[in-house]
Amino acid sequence: MMTELQRIVDVVHLTSGYGETRILDDVSMFAREHEITIILGSSGCGKTTLMKHLIRLYHPWSGSIRLFGQEITAMDEPEFNALLLKVGVLFQNGALLNSITVAENIAIPLEQHTKLPLDLIRRLVHTKLRLVELSHAIDKLPSELSGGMRKRASLARAIALDPPLLFCDEPSSGLDPITSESMDRLLLRMRDDLGISIVIVSHELASIHRIADSIVFLADGKCLFCGPFHEAKSAGIEQIDRFFKVGSFG
Ligand SMILES: Nc1ncnc2c1ncn2[C@@H]1O[C@H](COP(=O)(O)OP(=O)(O)O)[C@@H](O)[C@H]1O
Ligand SMILES: [Mg+2]
């Protein structure tokens, strides 16, 4: 018998916005473990807002958000911070510190959240950089890297603590198609070799075809579809069909 994959992210009836403006309207979505789930939708539809809710940068007006089966909206701060150690986050702008080297950037989470000796931290940093194919850049400053290399360094930092769950906001935005493809290859490697569950915000059709197991399709603040990618294409939802035909949300 096939076992159901567990929902590692489970959002139910989430409604939220800024000030009086409603952005997410009764959104229910989930992501399953060991899968790549892609949140897609037109620019400004609330993808980043949704992702920020998942790490509690915002608090919803109403609704439930579970990570690893635990309700985060009601958790106290210490409990949530402990849970957050199991979540890697790659923000849209990478956010590496520019005054220190790539190695030092990746060491930060290890120094802050573990008591490991420095030589072991150094070795773990090496391992992560090898994983993202950036060993040669270990002593470089972020400003000396290309856009694609900076993204990979940010990815290495996001997985420094071996999180079972990784959130990436537009990991290939601003990258050329070839660099974007190599980013996708790395994300597949994280899923397949490390078993990480990954939730990605994206609107790139090519990338979605390469890496999506499941998709969450947002439009006008609502979730129009959440489920396996192959089912999305045959769900008979006009906006989704249009997106997969022409690559735009129009
Ligand atoms: N901090 C904020 N304060 C007020 N409005 C915001 C804020 N962040 C985003 N918005 C607005 O909320 C909407 C959704 O934004 P966002 O979640 O960033 O969309 P997406 O990531 O899908 O492009 C947009 O109209 C945006 O202008
Ligand atoms: Mg965004």
Image (cartoon, grey):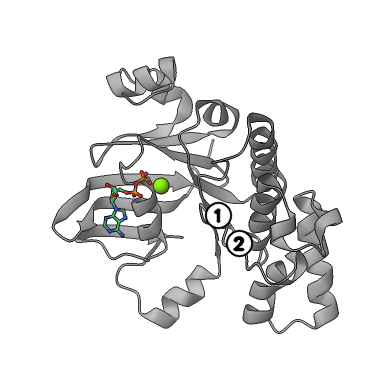
**Closest to the observer, 103 or 119:** 103
At label 1, the amino acid type is: Leu
Q: Residues within 10 Å of mark 2 (few under 14, many from 20)?
A: some
Task: Identify the residue under disc 2.
Answer: 163
**Closest to the observer, 74 or 203:** 203
Q: Is residue 129 visible?
A: yes
| Residue shown at the point (70%, 60%) measured from the top left | 142
- Looking at this view, name the residue that lies furthest to the left: 20
On the picture, is 39 further left or further right than 196? Answer: left
On the picture, is 87 further left or further right than 25? Answer: right
Where does residue 245 sit, x and y in percent of width and height?
A: 42, 15
Q: Mark 2 falls on what kind of element?
A: loop
Q: Mark 1 falls on what kind of element?
A: strand
Image position of 160 with respect to 79: above or below: above
Counting the numbered discs, the total is: 2
- Picture quadrant where residue 250 is located: top left
Q: Is the CB of mark 1 within 8 Å of ligand 2?
A: no
Image position of 129 with respect to 99: above or below: above
| Residue shown at the point (77%, 52%) measured from the top left | 131
| Residue shown at the point (32%, 42%) measured from the top left | 44
- Picture quadrant where residue 90 is located: bottom right
Where does residue 75 sit, x and y in percent of width and height?
A: 35, 74
At label 2, the amino acid type is: Pro
Quadrant of the frame with the N terminus: top right
Marker disc for residue 166: 1
Q: Is residue 237 visible?
A: no
Q: Are marks 2 and 1 in contact (CB under 8 Å)?
A: yes
Where does residue 182 sit, x and y in percent of width and height?
A: 70, 37
Where does residue 17 sit, x and y in percent of width and height?
A: 22, 55
Marker disc for residue 157: none
On the picture, is 69 further left or further right than 178? Answer: left
